[in-house]
Amino acid sequence: MSDLSQVVRLPVRRIELDLSFEGAARIAGDLREHVPDIAAEAVCRIERRLPEFFRPHDPRYSKATQRCVERAVDHFLELMADPAAPSAEVAEFWRQVGVGEASEGRTLDSWQAATRIGTGLAVERLADRAERVGHRMSPATVAAIANAALDYVNQVAAIVAEGHADAAARAAGARQEHRRHLLDLLLNGASSAELKEAAREADWAPPRTLAVVALRENGPDARHPALPPDVLPGLHLGEPCLVVPDPEGPGRTRMLERQLHGWTAAIGPAVGVDEVGTSLRLARETLELACQGLISGSSPIPAERHMPILVMMRERALVEKVIARRLAPLLRARPAQRYRLAETLLACLEHGFNATEVAGHLHLHPQTVRYRLRQLDDLFGDAVEAASDRLELHMALRAWLALDPEPAAARDDLGYG
């Protein structure tokens, strides 16, 4: 398994300056003493034009920005005087700037905007100071310095971006590992103290309730879901799953339906953090029955809505014996009748033997339902409506219809039969 927290370190870049004209070294030498003043003015302009780049209550950020500007201008002048001057230490400085921005969760957009503002002012002031100390700054020379400054800033920006990307990748890898560890602890019933510490390391706020979603790929169409940051993914597990905080919250079901395209999913009941194992077990049992075709429904399938079949399938041998005994009269009927009569009898039990309601539920004519009830009376006699055995009969019918041993052709609607 690859470890994203171990990012290959890139070789340190060399910063180069393509700037050569007569007197360049002398001009650079005369300008070095003006660097602090130019940097301070650049910071003021950046702060005025880009206030969001700074922190009003933290003066250290302004000072850090001024150090960066001074470092950039000073190194630029150093390369202007000696193009072969070393740049490894400066390049590492800029790489760490990128690391720092990433560690604070900032993108480089503001940094790049600030750099553009500072570069423009620095070129203006360098040309102005050079004129003041007696150097003739022709338009061509100023243009050459401006182009070189832009190229320098582009090289610096690339180094900062590498540091930022490296740090972001390390942080993402570490976060992923912490969340995988947290997921393992949740699924394996770790203590509250262990979970609290792991949640803190994973930057995950323990919710009031959560649920486990058990998953199985349907084939090559399964795609990696784009999940909210508070969902803990266990797609790397032999039996993939998700831990979903606040599963009954608004939009949660829709999110899962949308993101789990290509997966068969079953969701366990919402439980407390210390009962994740229960949600996981019921989600996996529901998923297994769904994959066997014993449970149907749109994914994710809620385990709580299929409690009877879940409970009964744990004792399948006993259920099959009850079916054989309790539904014996029905099972002796012709195959073409069995399914229709079982479906009708189950609907009657659930609708109080009201032929009109049963007909609406099954999309039949009431007379068809009455005809089938007479057939059921012939098969079962008074036992059909006996209150004492109704629960057992109801469960046996549910189980037999789920197991559905009859071929589809035997269940075709044959009119009033």
Image: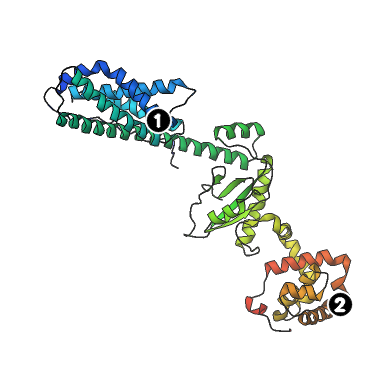
| Residue 99: numbered disc | 1
Quadrant occupied by the N terminus: top left
Q: Is residue 116 left or right of residue 240?
A: left
Question: Does the image show residue 86?
Answer: no
Position of residue 248 relative to residue 273, above or below, is below
Give above or below for 373 relative to 82: below
- Specify the color scheme: rainbow
Closest to the observer, 30 or 171: 30
Specify the quadrant that holds the C terminus: bottom right
Q: Earlier in the sequence, mark 2 or mark 1?
A: 1
For the point 25% across and 33% down, which residue is it? 150
Residue 117 location (% of width, % of height): 33, 31
Q: Which residue is mark 2?
A: 381
Q: How many marks?
A: 2
- Residue type (three-letter) at the residue carrying disc 1: Val
Q: Residue at coordinates 54% horizontally, 39% vertically from top-left?
A: 179
| Circle 1 Cα neighbour tier, 10 Å, few/some/many (<14 / 14–19 / ≥20) | many
- Residue at 47% x, 25% y is 56
Mark whose residue sits in front, 2 or 1 = 1
Observer-nearest residue: 341 or 211?
Answer: 211
Residue found at the far top of this picture: 33
For this orientation, the residue located farthest to the left is: 22
Q: Amino acid at mark 2?
A: Gly
| Residue 242 screen position, x and y as percent | 58, 48
* Residue 255 shown left or right of residue 343 in the figure: left
Compared to residue 339, the image places residue 159 above or below, namely: above
- Describe the element under mark 1 as helix, strand or loop: helix
**Marks 2/1: CA–CA distance:** 81 Å
Horizontally, residue 329 falls left or right of residue 291, namely right
Which residue is at the front of the view, 368 or 189? 368
